[in-house]
Amino acid sequence: MKVGKIIVTAAAAGLVSVGASAQSPAELQQAAQQAMQAAQQAMQAAKAAQAAADQAQAALAKTQQAAAQAAPVAPAGGGQLSGLTYTNGANSATLYGLIDVTISHNNNADKAGNSVTGTRTAWFSGNRWGLTGKHDLGTGNGLKAIFRLESEFESQTGDMDTPGNLFNRDAWLGFESESLGKLTFGRQNALARDPAGSAVYGDPYGSAKANLSEGGYSNNNNFKQLIFYAGSATGTRYDRGIVWKKNIGNAVAGLAYQFGNVPGSFNKGSTETGSLAYNGSNYTVAGFVTNANVAGLTNRTYSIGGNFRPNSVVRLNAGYFHYTAEQPLAIGKRTDNAWTASAKFTPQGKMDYEVGYQVMSANNAAVNGGGFVVNAYSDVTGATAAATGKRKTFYASTFYHVDKSMELYLAFDHLSTTGGYLASTANGFNSQNEVGLGMRYKF
């Protein structure tokens, strides 16, 4: 409008000038007509200037919106950052990652009982980077195509976690809507270890409430071995998996199937899992049942547990696992019973504290060539011996959260075994202590 005002002012000045030089009424009338034409032209110019200003403002707003979409944004409620997101019409994609570096000290680190100190496998999280995204299918009911590609690497060496396997954590495509739920196809977490399953009670580090996301507790240290009971015929993730999860009021239901892909046998190498969880006002209960065919032998787990949050500071977790597995006839059947209890304390400020205890009681469990008890859902077709005993672990940690992206931590665990149970990490000894000092960055 400033341009228009200038033009109108100039037209008025012209009118005064012409009027001052006019000598007769006819000349005055002609001058007035010329001034009116000048005023009309000035108004048209003003409208054109205003339209140009509006277009410039709209372009600026669009640029600001694109910049905001491309910037890292923390999700509602805080927590891990959502990554760097780019949106173009119905499509969006997010680049995200996590880097965890730990300096740790372990005793009984070899068969001679020596200790080791150094940067070893990250304590809490597998280092990863990934791409996830969605595409609005325009059906009018919110149906979207979704995908995730996620790769794990070793922060201390830069090596791929699984050599030759780029997206060893996730490689799936699927659909999601409020009415359908979430349906995904490909490489992904075993359903039983997700927040729709045992993650809400397996340890104090994951989500307190059941939901549709991936992200179960991990298996990096002595205290994180319960996760193998929440596994499949291919470990704690599915190859060739189909997973469906849905919010049903306060409940979260899940079903999963893993194709065995073995010629001549539809069941060999397959896995079926069902899970059900319920989110109360200050508690969550959950459980799952899994049946898997591992190299022709049936493995089964059922589990139940939950957590209770009496206030904003305290979270208490507990869970039970029962596992059975067929083994070679010379060994017989394996039966495990395991339980865990843990707590998380989050007082006001930048610190939080965790403590936990777990017991894995194995009866007639196959051992490998070194005499160590193998994990649940392992291929034991070549095993010739078994052992009975208990594996017990106490652990504790504290975190200092610098901000929503960066945190420092101190952690400790003590492993002990009884009877014939020997853990491979302790190299034939009946105990092991680990302590770690680390930092974790999420983007």
Image (tube, rainbow, N blue to C red):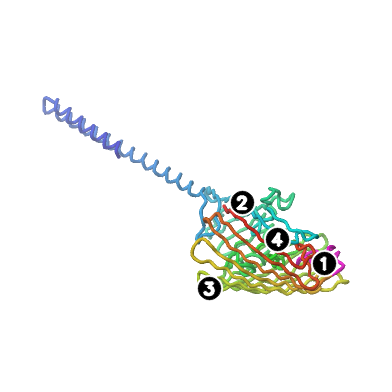
Residue that mark 2 sits on: 131
Res. 323 mark: none
Identify the element where label 1 is drawn.
loop
Crowding at dot 4, Cα within 10 Å, few <14 / some 14-19 / many 20+, comes out as many
Distance (Cα) linking label 4 and label 3: 30 Å
Of mark 1 and mark 3, the one earlier in the sequence is 3
Pointer 1 with pointer 3, Cβ within 8 A:
no
In the rendered structure, which amino acid carries the disc numbered 2?
Answer: Leu
Pointer 3 with pointer 2, Cβ within 8 A:
no
Residue that mark 3 sits on: 282
Of mark 2 and mark 4, the one earlier in the sequence is 2
Of mark 2 and mark 1, the one earlier in the sequence is 2
- Work out whether residue 94 or residue 123 is closer to the camera in this orientation and state it: 123
In the rendered structure, which amino acid carries the disc numbered 1?
Answer: Val
Crowding at dot 2, Cα within 10 Å, few <14 / some 14-19 / many 20+, comes out as some
Mark 2 vs mark 1: in front: 1
Give x and y (percent) for residue 90: 54, 51
- Residue at 63 percent across and 57 percent down: it is 437
Residue that mark 1 sits on: 367
Identify the element where label 4 is drawn.
strand
Give x and y (percent) for residue 73: 51, 53
Mark 1 vs mark 4: in front: 1
The mark tally for this picture is 4
Of mark 3 and mark 2, the one earlier in the sequence is 2
Split into 4 quadrants, where in the image is the N terminus? top left
Q: Which span is picked out in magenta? A: 368-385
- Residue at 84 percent across and 73 percent down: it is 332
Crowding at dot 1, Cα within 10 Å, few <14 / some 14-19 / many 20+, comes out as many
Residue 291 appears in the picture as rendered? yes
